[in-house]
Amino acid sequence: MADPALTISAQGLSRSFGARWAVRDVTLELKRGEVLGFLGPNGAGKTTTMQMLTGNLAPSAGSVSICGVDLLDAPKQAKARLGYLPEVPPLYKELTVTEYLRLAARLHRLPKVQVQAAVDLAMERCGLLPMAKRLIGSLSKGYQQRVGIAQAVVHQPDVVILDEPTVGLDPNQIREIRALIRELGRDHSVILSTHILPEVESVCDRVQIMNEGRMVYSDTIAALKEARDARGLVVGLRRPPAVGELAAIPGVAKVAPLSEHLFRLALQEAPDPTDALVERSVRLNWGLVQLSPAQTSLEDVFVQLTQREETAP
Amino acid sequence: MIFTIAAKELRSLFISPLAWVILGFLQLIMAWMFLSRLDAFLGVQSQLMALPAPPGLTEVIVAPVFGATALLLLLAVPLLSMRLMAEERRNQTISLLLSAPVSMTEIVLGKFLGLLLFLLLLVGLLGLMGASLYAGGSLDLGLLLANLLGLALMAASFAAVGLFLSCLTQQPVVAAIGGFGVLLGLWLVNMSTADPDSPLHLLSLLKHFEAFNKGLVDTADLAYFLLLIAAFLALSIRRLDGDRLRG
């Protein structure tokens, strides 16, 4: 809990709307200088989770702490360290870019003397200087999106949370925004929610996938890329044995649990463990429900996890 | 923080044409009423002089104009207050305020203060109009100040009610009509009773304003307005907090 490198730590976060659980028992940790890709199909609970992380929505259970400050106990101190760009950028269309960013800086309790410098810096980073005096309502969607990002970083927060920041932008703008996010990732922690998988692979250090309100996958991009090169199998077992038992099958080099029921097996050159695996599964009643070549891309992982959930018990 | 939000509200009001239109029209109507009362006063001045205790300029001109302005504000304030929260929610700009280190109380007070400053400007202009009578006669300053205080409190109450209604909905128009309904209800609540001791009189906005209009500053009336304002502001805060909790 007191790890100083942790900028955001959410434990057992849950949220229900009436009888429906939108988010269940989500745990999430982020270190300084890390960019976390936050994936999931529509309606998986990503936005709800982000709203809870930023104090827009009160969790039904669980806790959030930002740089060691509890968001529920000391919301003002915690929120001062947060920058948030929601799905719909919260822009006052009747203000100019400068006026709006000044307001955002003041709302985040930046001292008056620092406001102008902070606004200038944010505009420069987001490429907004030529638009400084324009009304936000008259800007194109791409520039409005940048104003939204500038708003989230103007007070130099420790954590920046961006909800689908590249939606509706053209390819050039997307590249610029991605470069900006990578730059932000150097001195802030960033949580990035998106549907665009290559974006995650190119920008993020770590990826978490949500499905139906639960966190179903969490790994580093580096590990993912490593797995791409290795030969492997993904095995789904209804009643999985201990990991050691799987590893003991001849031909299996390593076992990595993906979730409670899903395992990724890295294979040795020989022998092929597939027959032995199926045979043992039947004999020992493991309840084999899935056996497929290991996923190679994030997209495979995503599809596997978010579709398999229906058939898994 | 309250002042940052209030300043933003005031700026947004003055950017929108609606505020200017309302300000202009009210000023026009107030000036017209003022001049017509002045005209009437000049017409009957000689007869009034014959009375043993003649009513002064203030009584004949200022008080009725203030009374009528209170009614005009009842129509105008819901139009000004309707977008305070409703538009923030509809455009989802509210999340800027919610994710900033600002409490619900500060948000509500800031919004209220922004609108109140605008309304005080309106009331101040009317006060200047009354004070212009100094140029040609003597004024009952106490009566003028009592009227100003009464009108300011009335405007603040309207703003608090309007703000609360705006917290209830995402549609500014619904907030305006709702605010208008509630205010008119509070204004006329004692109409149905002929009994002068009926408790309904205690609820009526008009009844409490009448005292100020006559130049009587009564703590009971002051308390009524302050309680009304505090109650609706507290309800607004609760309502916004409820949004965060229930979603």
Image: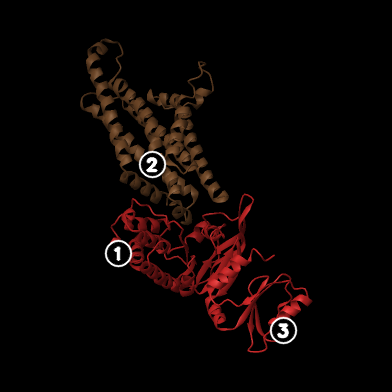
Chain colours: A red, B brown
Vertical arrangement, residue A145 with respect to residue B238, above or below: below
Under circle 2, the secondary element is helix
The three-letter amino acid code for the residue at tag 3 is Ile
Question: Is residue A1 visible to the viewer in this orientation of the structure?
Answer: no
Q: Residue at x 24, y 29 (%)?
A: B132
Check whether the beta carbons of the residues at disc 2 and disc 3 lie within 8 A of each other.
no
- The residue closer to the viewer here, B37 or A241, is A241
What crowding class fits label 2: few (fewer than 14 Cα within 10 Å), some (14-19), or many (20 or more)?
many
- The residue closer to the viewer here, A74 or A174, is A174
- Kindly identify which residue carries mark 3: A249
Question: Is residue B99 visible to the viewer in this orientation of the structure?
Answer: yes
Q: Using residue B131 as the reference point, say whether residue B71 is left or right of it.
A: right
Check whether the beta carbons of the residues at disc 1 and disc 2 lie within 8 A of each other.
no
The quarter of the displayed image where residue A244 is located: bottom right
The three-letter amino acid code for the residue at tag 1 is Leu
| Subunit of label 1 | A
Question: Which residue in the rendered view is the most extreme toward the bottom?
Answer: A270
- Kindly identify which residue carries mark 1: A129
The three-letter amino acid code for the residue at tag 2 is Leu
